[in-house]
């Protein structure tokens, strides 16, 4: 645990201090940044295991910082935001954030999410040779890549893990709560729309057509399943 570093990026010193206190107690090393530009510099310097990134920061905001980080790193990013608008969440997730925590937040919840994300990372890479192949679709979890008809699809780490989770159990329907537990690694109390948002983005990116031999189907009253058509 001591080798894992969490980078807290927020222009509010009180928030940085509060999160540092709680995260330090769990045995993590903590680095901090006060703006988007400093965040990018710190990512290069300390190679953090995870970033807690505020959406609204000076110099570079969280969205732009996230975009630039995603050009060279797949480090998990949990975004802090005072905005609850769904469109803002979609933009952030599409930019590359793995999760959202809305302000005001309970610092214990943030710590739980940090631990859940970091706990899942080794599991996601255990079978680094495993590849799922369907007609015109290849999902490589070891390399965190996916391709459709030979075209590489740019997925965030969490989108990749969600697609893998569904596709590795073809035909099985999962509730949103089961997907949150299986992919995010914690029981999510409250808004389950984060699953819907990720599914929407995956569908848009992989572009499954009506006559495609596979699809992510909505199971009304339940959740979602990856369907392979016979």
Image (cartoon, rainbow, N blue to C red):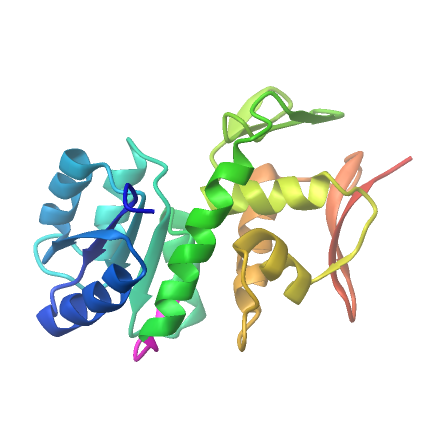
The location of residue 140, given as percent across then percent down, is: 58, 27
Residue placed most toward the observer, 197 or 129 = 129
- Residue 104 covered by magenta stretch: yes
The location of residue 13, given as percent across then percent down, is: 9, 69
In this picture, residue 119 sits left or right of residue 179? left
The location of residue 149, given as percent across then percent down, is: 64, 23
Q: Residue at x 54, y 27 (%)?
A: 142
Quadrant, the C terminus? top right
In this picture, residue 71 sits left or right of residue 14? right
* Residue 153 against residue 114 in the figure, above or below: above
In this picture, residue 37 sits left or right of residue 68? left
Q: Residue at x 78, y 71 (%)?
A: 221
Q: Main secondary structure of the magenta part?
A: loop
Q: Residue at x 50, y 31 (%)?
A: 144
The location of residue 42, given as percent across then percent down, is: 14, 42
Q: Residue at x 17, y 62 (%)?
A: 10
Q: Is residue 156 visible?
A: no
Q: Which residues are magenta?
A: 101-106
The quarter holding residue 92 reads: bottom left
Number of labelled discs?
0
* Residue 129 against residue 117 in the figure, above or below: above
The quarter holding residue 164 reads: top right
The quarter holding residue 55 reads: bottom left
């Amino acid at each position: 645990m001591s080798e894992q570093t969490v980078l807290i990026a927020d222009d509010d010193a009180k928030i940085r201090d509060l999160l540092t206190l709680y995260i330090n107690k769990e045995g993590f090393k903590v680095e901090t940044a006060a703006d988007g530009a400093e965040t990018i510099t710190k990512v290069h310097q300390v190679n953090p295991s995870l970033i807690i990134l505020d959406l609204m920061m000076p110099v570079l905001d969280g969205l732009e910082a996230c975009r630039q980080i995603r050009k060279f790193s797949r480090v998990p990013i949990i975004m802090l935001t005072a905005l609850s608008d769904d469109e803002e969440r979609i933009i952030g997730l599409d930019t590359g954030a793995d999760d959202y925590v809305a302000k005001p937040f309970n610092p214990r919840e943030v710590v739980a999410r940090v631990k859940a994300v970091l706990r899942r990372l080794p599991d996601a890479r255990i079978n680094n040779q495993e590849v799922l192949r369907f007609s015109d679709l290849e999902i490589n979890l070891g390399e965190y890549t996916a391709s459709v008809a030979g075209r590489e699809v740019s997925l965030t780490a969490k989108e990749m893990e969600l697609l893998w989770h569904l596709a590795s159990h073809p035909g099985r329907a999962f509730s949103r709560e089961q997907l949150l537990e299986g992919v995010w690694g914690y029981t999510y109390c409250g808004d389950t729309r984060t699953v819907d948002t990720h599914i929407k983005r995956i569908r848009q990116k992989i572009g499954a057509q009506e006559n495609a031999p596979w699809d992510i189907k909505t199971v009304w009253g339940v959740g979602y399943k990856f369907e392979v058509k016979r």
